[in-house]
Image (cartoon, coloured by chain):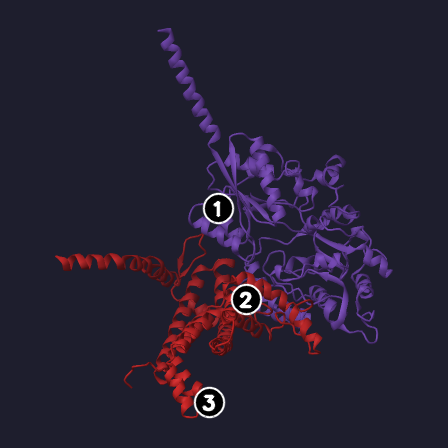
Amino acid sequence: MTFRKDSLWGWLFCLPLALGLTIWVAFPLGVAVVMSLFQWNMISPAVFIGLGNFDFMFFKDHLFWNSLWVMFYYTLLSVPLQLVTAFGLALMLNTKVKGMGVFRTIFYLPSLIPVIVSTALWMWLFNPQYGLFNLFLDAVGLPTQEWLTNPDMVIPSLVLMSLWSVGNIVIIFLAGLQGIPKELEEAVTVDGGGAWHRLRHVILPFMSPVIFYNLVMGVIAGLQIFTQPYIMTNGGPANASLTYVLHLYKQAFQFSKMGYANALALILLILTMVLSLIVFKSSNRWVYYEGDKK
Amino acid sequence: MKKGFAVVAALVLQVCFIVAGLSAENIKLSFMFWGSPAEDTAIRKALKDFEAANPGITVTPLFATYSGAEYDAKMKAMSESDTLPDVGYFGGQFYDYASNNFFLDMTPYVTKEGIKNDYLPQTWIMYQNKIVGAYTAAESQVVYYNKKVLQDAGVPLPPTDYAKSWTWAQYVDVWKKLTIDKNNKHPGEAGFDPKKVVRFGVNHEMWNQMLLPQVWSNGGDIFSADGKQILIDSPATIQVIQDFADLRNKYMVMSSPGLTEYNSTSKVDPKVLLQNGQIGFYVSGQWELLDFAGMDFPLGIGALPIHKNPAQLYVSGINVIFKATKNPDAAWKLQKWMMTPDKTLDLYSKGLWMPTKASWYTSKADLDKWVPTKAHPEGFKAAVLDSMKIARVMPPNVRNADQIWSEFINPELDLVWLGKQTAEQGMKKAADKIRKSGLLTGLWN
């Protein structure tokens, strides 16, 4: 009797999550898979076209490969830079300096600003004629840049902007750093090791699970980059910042190709899964878990 | 007995009143629109006035932003969930909706009231010989300049007669004279530093419709009349596009390119630059008059440059009545209200729109209602208002036009504006791709 009652409670507590996942994730995913086989503009009846959308995607859509490249370029450039920047900041914010609370707040603040607002702000910084960056470059005698208007510069500029809001990653790193046993760092010092040895042989191994977590999250976020190019460049100049999700969005909502957009979304899902799997597989080689028998 | 009868009669009467009241007050309409804060205010006022003039009808204003595809996305969500408004502005994919029978046929109303010819001929939007929409307003292109800047620089003011304007080359000459770097040197002079310019001669809006008056003036076009040919690689069109690119890359009279796919909010507002004297001329839409009216500097208006023949653009959003409306008669009343400039005078007298009603261009009584206001500087009538006689609409019914511009033409234009390729190279490349894309499938009609 008590067993049945317990299990009832168990089901009850699971229910919100189970229902949420079913209604908001599994069901739309299923619909997306089905709709990827249709030609559908949302206002006239959908027409079944088999694998037509995928045929168009791989062989006819000249922007598919372009947007795929932009997505990978952004991810490959931004994720390592974000991790290194955040890790460096976390190390500095983990030292014992007076007023550390203030510094930690300052570096976290940008993450609290809504993306739209920070993006608008950065558009001013990037302005070729009146922006702060070019005024600064000009003042110190360096050549000014066409940050967002030059096809070669636009992705690096977006990556630069993404480094401004690494606060969330910093917080996670900081929490990880505080969990490192002090006695191990002291042991390195006693053995005559310097800061580099502490970093290389204690901090990095202990931090590897945290780095791993941030890497996975960073890659997933990088593949989905949308808001910044949508607001700042709308994919331009010359499609140089047309990321995959922006391409998908335009197909769906600007050109009413909802079936095709679903097909694009499906491919993105598969790509994300494959990439995550690769990162997970590789983690055996470099992620160290305390208490792991290996 | 008598008393009982009176009570019953009173009750019956009361019920009648309630029923009548209900049916009179039962009509609820919604009106969906986009626009700047000023347009938002003006539209809400127009709707309130409509309610006051039509007791028993209430109108809910539905404001949505028109950046990117947001308005269109909202429209789609509403069409999927059967929550479309009764009347409203309509954004992209007009003919997809028209061909799926989403819009009320206004022809019976327009015919019955005999008002078709009261409006500019461009106004009505036809699909399968039915009026399925009407342009919200008449809007066009304008050459703005800062009078003080021109006078201080000693350059002549541009003509205002649209038919006898300066040629493109004459305008470029003036823009060169107005462009100065921090050592007071002009483009072409020895020692001129294009990176240290303190005032550019001109800022010309570069989004697709803004290129059209010059393209047409030169005898070029974008699509053929049947929508089956792309003409961007015709010599006349290429020449105009090269002329635009030269403003920045050859003559250095214009600042960084206004990239075609760029969100307009990302730029420093050229109106402010004009006010500050950081540019001499600004070429944009006539709707800028609304904002200019609130800025304190001597604004001048000139006629558009001429390549070969005078040309003007008619551009506007579209108004529709949705077929799903439960009250088509009331919806038409509202639509007609919004098309009657007397009822929504602020929208015109303050500079945002020009009327679609024909007499408002010709009858002195009507002209006096909206033109002699602070928003319309001297020269407005000759340069802009009168030029509406020759204004052309970019055909809205070319199939896939939006996608052709966005995916094929604009990316190549970006590289032309940046000087990374010539107009000829870019437009030939784009035209080839478009011809192979299978998107040139004619007109919706």
Q: From mark 2 to mark 1, how far is it between C-alphas?
A: 33 Å
Return the x and y of residue B295 as percentages of the image width and height.
73, 51
Q: Which residue is disc 1 drawn over?
A: B102
Label 3 close to label 1 by CB (< 8 Å)? no
Q: Work out whether residue B155 can be spotted.
A: no
Chain B palette colour: purple
The numbered mark, 2 or 3, whose residue comes first in the sequence reads: 3
Of tags 3 and 1, which is closer to the observer?
3
Return the x and y of residue B409 as percentages of the image width and height.
61, 65
Return the x and y of residue B275 as percentages of the image width and height.
75, 56
Secondary structure beneath disc 3? loop
State which quarter of the image contains the N terminus of chain B.
top left
Q: Which residue is disc 3 drawn over?
A: A194
Return the residue nearer the eye: B369 or B305.
B369
Specify whether A7 is left or right of B316: left
Disc 3 with disc 1 on a shared chain = no
Residue A229, numbered circle: 2
